[in-house]
Structures are given as structure tokens and as C-alpha cells.
Amino acid sequence: MKEEEVNRCQIQEWYPRFKSLSIKTQIHELPEPFIQYLLDDSSPFLLPISISNDDALPNRVHKPEDEEDYQVLEGSEDDSEPPSPPPSFPELELKIKESIESLGGAVFPKLNWSAPKDSAWISSTGSLRCTNFSEIALLLRSSDSLVHDLCHAYDSCGDKSSSRPPSFFLALRKWYSSLRPEMEFRCFVRGHNLVGISQREVTTFYPLLLEKKNYIERLIQEFYEANVHLKFESENYTFDVYVTNDERIKVLDFNPWGAFTLPMLFDWEELEETSREEGKTVDFRIVESQCAVRPGLKTAVPYDYLDVGPGSGWDQFLRSADDEYQRQTRSTEAGA
């Protein structure tokens, strides 16, 4: 993999071209002091001072005087250092506030590549829905998965020349409360050919998908040929889509082939083999029964960032789960 392939998957790179096919998004370049604030883990719940009282999170905003009872002082009081004042980013906050208003009052945030899905638990709604700057800052600063964007984006690149991109961007995407997780799919493109499609929410069985599988497959294939094929420069990549209630397709994201991108209901080895078989139709996979659900993945860490590589704990766990599924299937067939 090359750096240019990873760079193409940054939202500020692909969104302008696919804007009409995606969900409404406002993108802001982040100042370097804000990046350093995100990387500073000395006080996880330290939030910036908000210029708007409406944006404040009174139960979470860092107040030095609230920490006095928890400070351990060594030596005399003269030896202690006063706590650093909370940071403030008034210009960025004003831009974000304007964007949130223009997008209907609620957004979900992501950086160049990743969204802070693993920190959704910390929000009052248990989701990525944000209505102000303080909520966005809390999600971003509390996320471990964003460390990938900040420090490890090019780790899988053979021509790696840097550990981070020259600039970071915050994408604010319009929040839709009606989105259904079962209608989001990951599509795999190899050699400019669509070779696989996978249900993204692999922790749940949705009977409706069984009924609509062939139709959804046809919709996605037609969409790819008309709107994505040869319009995204990489030869090998993945892209995520959402199928709306009125049967339109929306592009959600682009990701590199392999590396930190998870293959969902596939594994990369079989995708590589599938792409070399001429004349083979697209392999569309969904969770087809309750027994086939990927168990134990509803954690604070998003599925896309779990280590499921060969030999990992999750790899062994999933193999055991697959063995159990096969055992149950054989037992069912034998009793039929």
C-alpha cells in the first residue's frame, strides 16, 4: 500500500467529488494547538473553555478548584505547581457552531479517516450525536480509535515518509436519527472491479435483509457502475454505502484495501482469491441467521478497530464461534 492510496480516503479529499451522493457535511481544518490538545492524555476529561454558556457541559468541564481535594502535594505548598488553565479555541468554536446550525442543529464528528465510535458511551445520548463544541471535544478527546488518524495512519504503507498527514480536518456530518444500521454495507473493489459486499452491522441478524438481499445487491452494483467505477482513482479500495428507504444509495466513506480496514464477513485472503477469478459474480454476504451473528462485538471499541488478525485474541474467539456455529448447524441437520 502507498501513502497516496491512504490519502485518497481522507474525507476532505473524496467528499467534494462525491458530495451529491453523500450526506451533508461541513469540513474544517484544525489548528495544531487543538491537535496537541487531543493528544494530551494528562487529564482525559479536560474540556476547552466554551465562549457560549449554551455549549458548556457543567458536569464535565475541567475546573481547577474542583481538583483541589484530589491533588497529592509533595513537600511544602511552595513546591506545588498551579494547574494549567483549560484551553480555549474561540475561532474554531464559532466555525463549528455555524456549521452545526447550517446542518440542522445536530451532527456527528470524524477526523480525516475515523469517527470516535469507541467513545460514544461517554455522551449523554450514548451516540455520536453532538449539538455543540463541548460535546464534540469530549468525544474526540475520549476516543482511542482516533489515535490511528493522529499517529498511525501510514503504518501499513511501504513508502511511509511520515507518521501523520500535514493537516488534520474535522468533518461534521448531518445527524439523521432515522438511519437503520442494517442498511449500511461495505463494498470491496479489487482491480477496479466490485468483488464483494458485506453487511456492516455484523453483530445482529436482520430477517429483512434475507428478503431484500438480491434486490439490494443489484442496487449497489448499479450504483457502483454508474457513480464510483473509475471515478475513485485507486485500483483497490473499499467504500461504505447506505441504502435509504426510497432505495437511493448514499456514500458514507472510503477506506484502503487491507491494512486497518476490516473485511467484515470476509477475510482478506479470500477476497484476494475472489478478485482473481474471472467471470465470478459479486459475493454479497449478510448475517443469515441468529447463529451466524458475530458474538461479543458490541463493545465500546468499534468493530473496525478490533484486532482480529491471525493469532489475536479476537481471531481465536471468532474461530471458536465459527466452530460452534458449524456444530449447531450439523446438529440441526442431523435432527431434521
Image: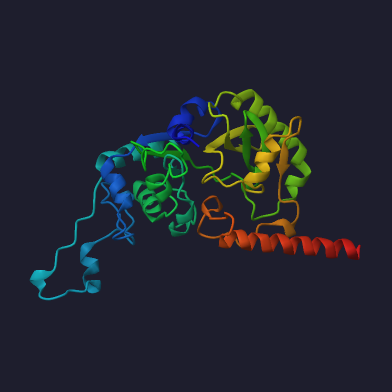
Whole-percent x and y of residue 45?
33, 59
- The quadrant holding residue 224 is top right
The residue furthest bottom is 75
Q: How is the image coloured?
A: rainbow
Whole-percent x and y of residue 237?
57, 35
Q: Is residue 277 visible?
A: yes
Rendered residue at 21%/74% (across/down) = 72
Rendered residue at 64%/55% (across/down) = 203
Whole-percent x and y of residue 94?
30, 39
Number of dots carrying numbers: 0
Rendered residue at 57%/47% (across/down) = 262
Rendered residue at 61%/46% (across/down) = 263
218 or 272: nearer the eye?
A: 272
**Is residue 47 rendered to the left or right of residue 334?**
left
Whole-percent x and y of residue 119?
45, 55
- The quadrant holding residue 109 is top left
120 or 284: nearer the eye?
A: 284
The residue furthest left is 78
**Is residue 5 rendered to the left or right of residue 291?**
left
Q: Is residue 247 visible?
A: no
